[in-house]
Image (spheres, rainbow, N blue to C red):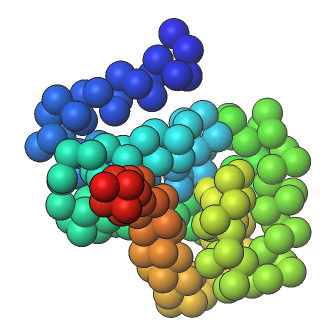
Amino acid sequence: MSLHDIIEQIVNFVKDHEAWAMPIIFLLAFGESLAFISLLLPATIILLGLGALIGESGLNFWPIWIAAATGAFFGDWLSYWFGFHYKESVGTMWPLSRHPQTLVRGHRFFERWGVWGVFIGRFFGPLRAVVPLVAGICAMPKHHFQLANFASALIWAFGILAPGAFGLRWLAEWMG
């Protein structure tokens, strides 16, 4: 089964079962933000597709946006917690043990940018889940981490869902 098939199946499932949109989007955003899962899950592409589905189907954007932001928030929070409690030993755990350069790049990025790194890291693929893990390893103060985590989760969720949700509707209206 190809990546395209998986994306298509998930989008079609949500299309046929709209009541599942919020829990599925929560889980996808959670997985996309969780240190170990994000390296294996193509959630960004699926979320972009679901954003387009929101625009097509007339689903209410705001509860789905909250579900995505909440999933992203808790994924980063759990990654931070994991790093805070397991410190450097996380680098020996799968799948990070197979991608040690990812943790090194995340550490370098975090050391350079600090709290802003947590915020900015949300918007860059592999850094998205590794920077919160590194913030935990480095024992970043929890309230600083959570502030950056909360703000970036809200903006990231909007940025990933809104283009499809509002862009398609606007384009259809503009084209008549």
Q: Which residue is drawn at 23% across and 51% down?
A: 22
On screen, residue 103 versus residue 48, left or right, reads right
Residue 21 position, x and y percent, is 23, 45
On screen, residue 44 versus residue 87, left or right, reads left
Residue 154 in sight from this viewpoint: yes
Q: As rendered, which of 88 and 17 lies closer to the eye?
A: 17
Q: Quadrant of residue 79?
A: bottom right
Q: Residue at x 62, y 57 (%)?
A: 129
In this rendering, the answer to whether 65 lies above or below 140 is above
Residue 157 position, x and y percent, is 43, 65
In this rendering, the answer to whether 10 lies above or below 144 is above
Q: As rendered, which of 108 and 122 lies closer to the eye?
A: 122
Q: Residue at x 51, y 10 (%)?
A: 1
In this rendering, the answer to whether 47 lies above or below 3 is below
Quadrant containing the C terminus is bottom left
Residue 78 position, x and y percent, is 48, 61
Q: As rendered, which of 56 and 7 lies closer to the eye?
A: 56
On screen, residue 1 versus residue 117, left or right, reads left
| Residue that extends furthest to the front in the rendered view of this protein | 176
Q: In which quarter of the image is residue 122?
A: bottom right
Q: Which residue is drawn at 84% across and 78% down?
A: 111
Q: As rendered, which of 86 and 7 lies closer to the eye?
A: 7
In this rendering, the answer to whether 116 lies above or below 33 is below
Residue 130 in sight from this viewpoint: no
Give the number of marks. 0
On screen, residue 26 versus residue 94, left or right, reads left
